[in-house]
Amino acid sequence: MEENAPSGRRSGWKQDPAAVQADILRAATEEFARNGLDGARISDIAERTRTTKRMIFYYFQDKQTLYRRVLEEAYRKIRAEEAELNLGALPPLQALRRLVEFTFDHHRRSEPFIRLVMIENIHAARHLRDSDLIARVNDSAIERIRDICTRGQATGEIRPDITPLELHWMISALCFFNVSNRPTFGTNFGDELFTEQAQARLRERVADMVVAAARA
Amino acid sequence: MEENAPSGRRSGWKQDPAAVQADILRAATEEFARNGLDGARISDIAERTRTTKRMIFYYFQDKQTLYRRVLEEAYRKIRAEEAELNLGALPPLQALRRLVEFTFDHHRRSEPFIRLVMIENIHAARHLRDSDLIARVNDSAIERIRDICTRGQATGEIRPDITPLELHWMISALCFFNVSNRPTFGTNFGDELFTEQAQARLRERVADMVVAAARA
Amino acid sequence: MEENAPSGRRSGWKQDPAAVQADILRAATEEFARNGLDGARISDIAERTRTTKRMIFYYFQDKQTLYRRVLEEAYRKIRAEEAELNLGALPPLQALRRLVEFTFDHHRRSEPFIRLVMIENIHAARHLRDSDLIARVNDSAIERIRDICTRGQATGEIRPDITPLELHWMISALCFFNVSNRPTFGTNFGDELFTEQAQARLRERVADMVVAAARA
Amino acid sequence: MEENAPSGRRSGWKQDPAAVQADILRAATEEFARNGLDGARISDIAERTRTTKRMIFYYFQDKQTLYRRVLEEAYRKIRAEEAELNLGALPPLQALRRLVEFTFDHHRRSEPFIRLVMIENIHAARHLRDSDLIARVNDSAIERIRDICTRGQATGEIRPDITPLELHWMISALCFFNVSNRPTFGTNFGDELFTEQAQARLRERVADMVVAAARA
DNA sequence: CATGAATGAGTTTTCATTCAT
DNA sequence: CATGAATGAAAACTCATTCAT
């Protein structure tokens, strides 16, 4: 027995709490992103898990709380990934272009996050508003653009009458829509804009548009 | 019992079947737009109606069919409204600007439609694909832009390497996001972009961006 | 078929709604009186019924509402039975004695009602307060005593400084406790006071006490 | 997790076992008196405690046992308080009046105890019967009245055909009901009998009634 | 054609209690 | 002796849908 117990836990036996919670959050993220808050079933989440339905309530109280935690984690993770992008070394307009391109790619790779945000918008951001964790996490998104603007407006490369928030709104709109509305857009107008080639071209068009909007 | 109460219907009346169906569609549109496909409750729809839950199934078979009919109606109505915009008389770039401005305003006034499209995207456009009514209705949206492009590219005002579909994608992204993501965007970054003044300014920025992207 | 259908319903087939509801109320009264609001199980109620659990929610919405309806019915029934007692023909003090004796007997026969009232007191009369049906039903209880007092105080047989409410309180206390606290009283002090003989004697003692308290 | 949070306990302390048990009993008394046996929640009791849910089971086995211990403690405490009343020095009828007045006041101050007794009656005194501790503790209540009767019947002040048990029953009924049924009585007939003034008057009426019933 | 009444199958959630050191 | 972590069983309640005229 001692022979089989490698360190302090493991084997067919009680996992450590943090791992169980992470496992549940992962499964819940999948289910909520796929089916929405109302469409997701706790029992389906449990089945994607190494634990039981009961443990979900044990760690997360109820469905709404679990959903909120999923949302918080999704925002936290996405902002952390974005933070890895280092723009400080680039000249302002080049930094801006880089940011747009990165965001375009990043959103494409982050469909579950995009879907969670869509779902949260359907719910009028009710759960987001309940979360105090998220406010702080989003500030960084704006700060990065504010830095570009400050630098660019100092040198005169960026027009003085545009705000970081407006630029963030533009970038978000174009990159978010590309993922969020692909199903209806594709159904209505065909998938030609969603081939790799077309997406690459769209990516540059979007970068051009935002840079043009910012340029003095 | 209470569950089935025929709400406000006067006693022995014969209702006009078409009117009853229209009444149901109106109520269903409200509920689906507000709560999504899974979030909406047939009994809540019935309560917003002059008839009963039973009649909803009588006329619309099941929840999914009702939802599909709501979606079809919403698309039909929105495209009909858009068709009233007459751009043929304007020079190409002016027509384009006019179209962007119109779309920006129109989407702002059409929140229920925007929400239905979001909801449909969450469901991977499954129901849209089932509907053959919609394909035809969307063609007109592209045709209008194609006309602008054809004219503009003939005179050299519009660059030759941009497609009507790309322009439609740009316009949609910016105008759609403005409505669809207002709850989360407002929660994360404040409501300053959603005052009347800021929206008017955003509207011109968006028009500028699209026109700039199209200009030769 | 016509041959087997006797009137307008019956056979192994849908009972009329009122009968189903009455059946549920009867079963629920038994269960709530026996086990309290929290102790009673909807599924146990359903089993004592000719219907299913689902129908209980169909007709009564939820457990609390069902309990409130049970309470209302119990009060209504008990007051209706009391109303059959006609005291108007008797001289005041004789009427009062008759009322006490009747109440003593009546409470002994109405253990389920007594238990429901005990249970409701544990719940701080929360559900009783929610019921507007009950206020009216209880007025009659006081009116009957008020009539006795008015008559007795006019003739000088009943002391002027006693109120109908006080008399009702005394009668209730003695007759209610006799039933409500029999289990603990019997356990603590033996059952000798609860033999038929002892109860008959107690009944007269109680009548004597109340009459003595009222006599001028 | 949150469910088990050890509330306000300071880190590495060794708690005194007797103190922990007393703490649990206090919290359990509050919860059981407020919500009944079925209505009380072990986790709510734990929250009112300096320890955890687990410790409740450790020290008290299960919910029923804990409830029985709460009941036993309540009876023990109440009888101990009553024992402090010394009636031996007073003439019999004066002693009786004193006892009634004391009981009236004492019950008013002992709502949790009254409620526990009601709850136990709802449960047909099942747990009281399981407790051998209680039989002994109640004998003293009767002994005190028996002493008054013996003295009073010897002097002829108290009628010979009344028993201590009957007197105890009368006193209990009037004093118990006053507290136990206040919620429903107040809801049905108003709170006028429960003002300080009205209670003082009722107290004397009750004393008069019992003394009159005992007097030869 | 139209409809009041009924319901099976699930869904979230609760709760006392035990596991394993 | 004491305890943090875990859980099976059952509870209330919901929901789209069908029954039977």
Image (cartoon, coloured by chain):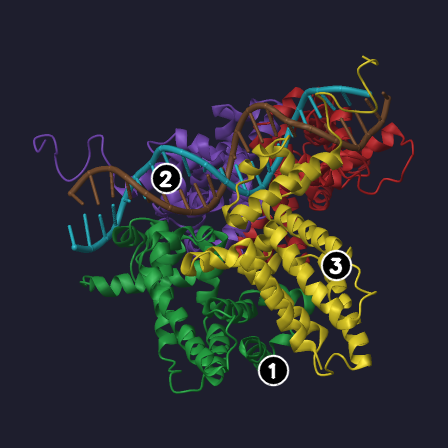
Chain colours: A purple, B red, C yellow, D green, E brown, F cyan
Q: What's the distance in space between the residues labelled 3 and 2, CA to CA?
A: 50 Å
Amino acid, disc 3: Val
Relative to the observer, which residue lies in front, B53 or D58? D58
Residue D138 drawn at (x, y percent): 37, 65
- The subunit carrying tag 1 is D
Nearest the eye: D73 or A53: D73
Judging by the rendered image, the residue that carries numbered circle 3 is C137
Q: Quadrant of residue F2?
A: bottom left
Q: Chain of mark 2?
A: A
For the point 19% across and 63% down, the residue is D13
Can residue B157 be seen here? Answer: no
| Residue drawn at (59%, 34%) of the image | C48
Numbered circles on residues, count: 3
Do discs 3 and 2 belong to a common subunit? no
Q: Amino acid at mark 2?
A: Met
**Eye-nearest disc, 1 or 3:** 1
Secondary structure category for the residue under label 1? helix
In whole angstroms, how far apart are the C-alphas of marks 1 and 3?
Answer: 28 Å
Q: Circle 1 sits on which residue?
A: D201
Q: Quadrant of residue A187?
A: top right
The residue wearing badge 2 is A55
Dots 1, 3 in contact, CB < 8 A: no
Mark 1 surroundings within 10 Å by alpha-carbon count, few (fewer than 14), some (14 through 19), many (20 or more): some
Q: Residue at x 80, y 60 (%)?
A: C86
Residue D85 showing in the rendered view: yes
Residue D47 against residue A181 in the figure, above or below = below
| Residue with the most extreme left position | A3
Q: Chain of mark 3?
A: C
Residue C139 pos. (x, y %): 75, 64
Mark 1 vs mark 3: tell me if same chain. Answer: no
Secondary structure type for disc 2: helix
Depth-wise, is mark 2 or mark 1 nearer the camera?
A: 1
